[in-house]
Image (tube, rainbow, N blue to C red):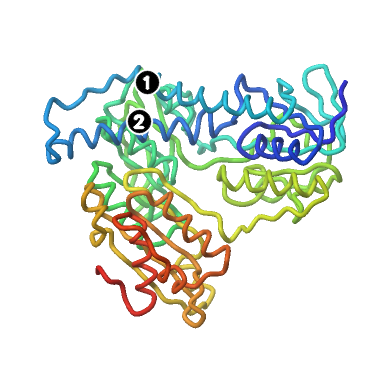
């Protein structure tokens, strides 16, 4: 068998990026992937297909609610669900084939199949054993469920099944008010489903800025989503294609039942390492079942690295990509680096929600003195012109140095706007640096500048 400098196991965002970077750095590289297509969960059953459905359903919302106001008259479009799924599938195909092209362009060998690691330096795929100086584990994650909740991917589904439902359900219960649950819940709400979100905690999007949480939930309620907070799901029962969801309210331990055509289990994800044989290798693991790594992303076994969802940190595609590039640099004898303090998070609903860095809650807990610069999109001319004036930009800066510590945005294009602050934080910029930078008018980005101005003498348009 061919010997390689490095074999990456898994062709998701972390794995395929790591493979391409390794090849670019002159290493003989292979990537093992058992799916029929490259791109992992993200491109096949995650980020990309969900964004296609979010876009399609948002266009429907615009046609139903805003077209007439703009003078676009006519019958509102009806939903051709099979065609919408076909559009989603074509989007997946274009992206996954793009990764195949990049592999060929960069001379990365795709070893098709599922891998096991019998020992350091060897990767077994089927009956063949491939040798490599370095192995990178990038096998990603899989949906996590709850006791008493049995997923069949037909009536009780994960995010994977939610992307291929046979029809739009009349009623849907979403278990979990995190990113996945709210994104897919909003898709089906726009398509006409009655969506109820059941969340164990007392706030949606755990870990996000408290003010954003409240504003976001209020907006989603206006869009038709219902919420049951502080509720512990006990079980789901399926009969004749219908489901019952039983939950207990934490405040009084009372038990309640919800009926649904579809139940979406969105209670997070867990590392996927099944079949790799890690127990025999003696790899050190964390208490939460992740692979433990050092600062260079190398595991406790020399020559074996791990990146992405299988190690600690936020389960985000772009975090995995950063680690993939950094690990490749390390393997090639260079210096790889990931700034974990500047990893943005985005929820692709309408409006979008984005954040980076510290929240007010974490700053208070750490005893950091800070100041807040806030600006509402109601003061942004562009946002008002396109019916997206709900939400705000909030910048948190050090009270003494004015250095930007974090930013939280809910509003139009938030997922793109946040990167201005990411760059600012990467360079150690102050809020004043952002405020003194000319921003084109009329753009959504002016709201970021106004929030930075609000950290000083005050915003202009608020």
Image quarter where the N terminus lies is top right
Q: Quadrant of residue 56?
A: top left
Q: Is residue 21 left or right of residue 359?
A: right
In this rendering, the answer to whether 27 lies above or below 219 is: above
Q: Position of residue 116 (x, y in %)?
A: 78, 28
- Cα distance in 3D space between marks 2 and 1: 8 Å
The residue lying at 53 percent from left, 31 percent from top is: 43
Does dot 2 land on a helix, a strand or a loop? strand
- The answer to whether the residues at label 2 and label 1 have Cβ atoms under 8 Å apart is yes
Q: Position of residue 272 (x, y in %)?
A: 64, 35
Q: Earlier in the sequence, mark 2 or mark 1?
A: 1
Image quarter where the C terminus lies is bottom left
In this rendering, the answer to whether 371 lies above or below 21 is: below
The residue lying at 76 percent from left, 53 percent from top is: 296
Q: Is residue 83 left or right of residue 267?
A: left
Front in this rendered view, residue 91 or 204: 91
Look at mark 2 in the image and give the residue it sits on.
244
Which dot marks residue 356? none
Q: Is residue 79 left or right of residue 326?
A: left
In this rendering, the answer to whether 454 lies above or below 18 is: below
The residue lying at 74 percent from left, 34 percent from top is: 8
- Numbered-mark total: 2
Look at mark 1 in the image and give the residue it sits on.
239
């Amino acid at each position: 068998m061919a010997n390689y400098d490095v074999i990456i196991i898994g062709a998701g965002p972390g794995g395929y990026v790591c493979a391409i970077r390794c090849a670019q750095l002159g290493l003989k590289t292979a990537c093992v992937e058992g799916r029929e297509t490259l791109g992992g969960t993200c491109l096949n059953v995650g980020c990309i297909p969900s964004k296609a459905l979010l876009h399609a359903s948002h266009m429907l919302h615009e046609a139903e609610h805003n077209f007439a106001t703009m003078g676009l008259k006519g019958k509102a479009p009806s939903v051709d669900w099979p065609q919408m799924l076909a559009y989603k599938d074509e989007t997946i195909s274009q992206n996954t084939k793009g990764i195949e092209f990049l592999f060929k362009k960069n001379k990365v060998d795709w070893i098709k199949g599922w891998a096991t690691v019998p020992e350091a330096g060897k990767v077994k795929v089927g009956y063949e054993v491939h040798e490599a100086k370095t192995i990178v584990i990038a096998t990603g994650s899989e949906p996590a469920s709850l006791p008493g909740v049995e997923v069949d991917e037909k009536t009780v589904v994960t995010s994977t099944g939610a992307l291929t439902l046979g029809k739009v359900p009349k009623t849907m219960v979403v278990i979990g008010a995190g990113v996945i649950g709210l994104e897919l819940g909003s898709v089906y709400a726009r398509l006409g489903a009655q969506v109820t979100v059941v969340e164990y905690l007392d706030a949606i999007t755990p870990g996000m800025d408290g003010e954003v949480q409240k504003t976001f939930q209020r907006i989603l309620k206006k869009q038709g989503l219902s919420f049951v907070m502080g509720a512990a799901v006990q079980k789901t029962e399926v009969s004749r294609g219908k489901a019952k969801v039983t939950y207990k309210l934490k405040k009084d331990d009372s038990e309640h039942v919800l009926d649904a055509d579809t139940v979406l289990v969105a209670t997070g994800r867990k590392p996927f390492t099944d079949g790799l044989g890690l127990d025999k290798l003696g790899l050190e693991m964390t208490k939460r079942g992740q692979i433990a790594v050092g600062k260079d992303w190398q595991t406790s076994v020399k020559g074996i690295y791990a990146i992405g969802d299988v190690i600690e940190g936020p389960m985000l595609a772009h975090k995995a990509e950063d680690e993939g590039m950094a690990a490749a640099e390390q393997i090639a004898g260079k210096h790889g680096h990931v700034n974990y303090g500047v990893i943005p998070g985005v929820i692709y609903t309408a409006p979008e929600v984005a954040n980076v860095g510290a929240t007010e809650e974490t700053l208070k807990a750490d005893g950091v003195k800070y100041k807040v610069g806030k600006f509402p999109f109601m003061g942004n001319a562009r946002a008002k012109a396109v019916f997206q004036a709900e939400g705000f930009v909030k910048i948190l800066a050090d009270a003494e140095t004015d250095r930007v510590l974090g930013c939280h945005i809910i509003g139009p294009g938030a997922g793109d706007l946040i990167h201005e602050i990411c760059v600012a934080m990467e360079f150690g910029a102050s809020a004043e640096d952002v405020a003194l930078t000319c921003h084109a008018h009329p753009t959504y980005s002016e709201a970021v500048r106004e929030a930075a101005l609000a950290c000083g003498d005050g915003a202009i348009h608020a």
